[in-house]
């Protein structure tokens, strides 16, 4: 298999996995444990973290964009805008934090930064769409706390994936 074919196949598999994880997490009744509307585990973020570590920013961005676009076709335009804003801001922040990964942050810290950025992006977009910037003050603090927890979980889950599949033994340094 050529390098291009291998790269396309790997990307398609990662998009598929991210879609499955996104759809699977919808079946988890997280609202019963955390009574905050819209809270999710962010399982697809494990795929984004893996893609960033193993493939780089560009490929991770393409994988994320395809996942968001496909889910946007299923969920509609408003969830598409919210997901795109949160996802793209999360990717950018994780990439920036990951660049300093060897010196300061573990993959757990990268996951936490990404989850928090995702929540900031989504709440900012929701505030714009609803014309209610008060959401940033009222809704965001609770989401930031849950984002730290879910980011810790997804970052922790990404460590063995990156170690085994990407051959990156340095993901905790």
Image (cartoon, helix red, strand yellow):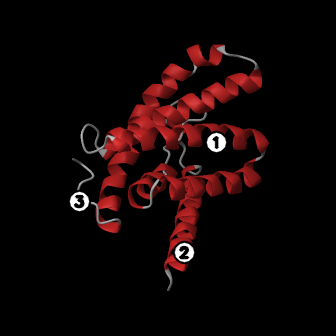
Disc 3: which residue: 169
Q: CA distance from mark 2 to mark 1?
A: 24 Å
The residue singled out by tag 1 in the image is 83
Residue 4: give x, y in percent of width and height.
54, 76
Q: Which residue is mark 2?
A: 9
Secondary structure under badge 1? Answer: helix
Q: Is residue 5 visible?
A: yes
Mark 3 to mark 1: distance in Å? 31 Å
Q: Residues within 10 Å of mark 1 (few under 14, many from 20)?
A: many
Q: Position of residue 74 (x, y in %)?
A: 74, 54
Q: Secondary structure at mark 3?
A: loop
Q: Position of residue 159 (x, y in %)?
A: 31, 54
How many numbered circles does the render carry?
A: 3
**Upstream in the sequence, badge 3 or badge 1?**
1
Q: Are marks 3 and 1 in contact (CB under 8 Å)?
A: no
Q: Counting residues from the N terminus, which is met first, the one under dot 2 or under dot 3?
A: 2
Looking at the rendered structure, the secondary structure element under dot 2 is helix
């Amino acid at each position: 298999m050529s390098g291009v074919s291998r790269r396309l196949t790997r990307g398609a598999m990662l998009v598929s996995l991210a879609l499955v994880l996104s759809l699977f997490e919808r079946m988890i009744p997280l609202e019963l444990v955390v009574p905050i509307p819209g809270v999710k585990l962010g399982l697809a973020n494990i795929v984004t973290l893996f893609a960033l570590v193993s493939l780089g920013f560009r490929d991770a961005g393409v994988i994320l964009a395809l996942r968001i676009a496909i889910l946007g076709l299923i969920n509609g335009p408003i969830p598409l805008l919210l997901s795109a804003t949160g996802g793209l801001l999360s990717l950018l922040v994780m990439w920036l934090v990951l660049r300093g990964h060897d010196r300061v942050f573990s993959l757990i810290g990268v996951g936490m930064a990404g989850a928090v950025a995702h929540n900031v992006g989504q709440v900012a977009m929701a505030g714009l769409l609803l014309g209610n910037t008060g959401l940033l003050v009222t809704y965001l603090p609770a989401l930031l706390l849950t984002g730290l927890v879910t980011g810790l979980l997804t970052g922790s889950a990404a460590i063995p994936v990156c170690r085994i599949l990407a051959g990156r033994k340095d993901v905790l340094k």
